[in-house]
Amino acid sequence: MKNNIFVGMEETCEPPEWFDNVKPFLEKVLEKLKLDHWEVSVMFCNDGFIRNLNSQYRNIDSPTDVLSFEGGDEYADDEGIVWYAAGDIVISIDTLLTNCTEFAVTLNEELKRLLVHGILHLNGMDHSDNSPEQEMLIFQEKLLKEMENETIVKE
């Protein structure tokens, strides 16, 4: 499987030590989901940046942990290969760290959860709330269990 994954940082943030491990993890997620020729971007930011996005696109004036912006367009590259521009994922490092404390989980576990959550949204899944019986969240946790030995953050 071949996918294009772009991982970046909002310009006011410094890349954390685990930054380079995000792309290989996402490649494994897309492979596990049998998603081929996907183009995805992930941007890490701070709470101020994601709060502005959350306010602008969801009319919620507070920071959040992850936002997904579905693309959905297909295009052919110079070699005639068709790519699916799946969309963009934005993750607040500030809220990621807060979640680790609030939910008593490791940084590695929570980061994987937010990345998988974003990919599932780009793949058309959704949930009406954050209750654990939501179909998307059940699938998310099953997938995370299957990938529990994958490491992004070495702790």
Image: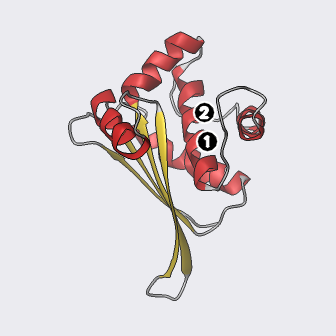
Discs 1, 2 touching: Cβ within 8 Å? yes
Determine which of the numbered discs, if any, sits on residue 5 in the image: none
Residue 45 seen anywhere in this rendered image of the structure? no
Figure quadrant of residue 118: top right
Q: Nearer the viewer, residue 126 or 148?
A: 126
Is residue 143 rendered to the left or right of residue 90? right
Q: Position of residue 96 (x, y in %)?
A: 46, 25
- Residue 119 lies, in percent from the top left, at 59, 49
Residue under the point 75% across and 32% down: 145
Q: What mark, if any, has residue 116 been given in the picture?
A: 1
In the depicted structure, whether residue 1 falls above or below residue 63: below
Work out which quarter of the rendered image holds the N terminus and state it. Answer: bottom right
Q: Identify whether 21 is placed above or below 39.
A: above
Q: Which residue is mark 2?
A: 113
Report whether 69 appears left or right of 25.
left
Real-space CA distance between mark 1 and mark 2, rounded to the nearest whole angstrom = 5 Å
Percent x, y of residue 111? 53, 31
Residue 133 vertical placement versus 27 (above, below): above
Q: Residue at x 59, y 16 (%)?
A: 105
Amino acid on which the number 1 mark rests in the picture: Val
Is disc 2 placed on a helix, strand or loop? helix
Q: Label 2 neighbourhood size at 10 Å, few (<14), some (14-19), many (20+)?
A: some
Q: Residues within 10 Å of mark 1 (few under 14, many from 20)?
A: many
For this view, does 83 lie left or right of residue 13?
right
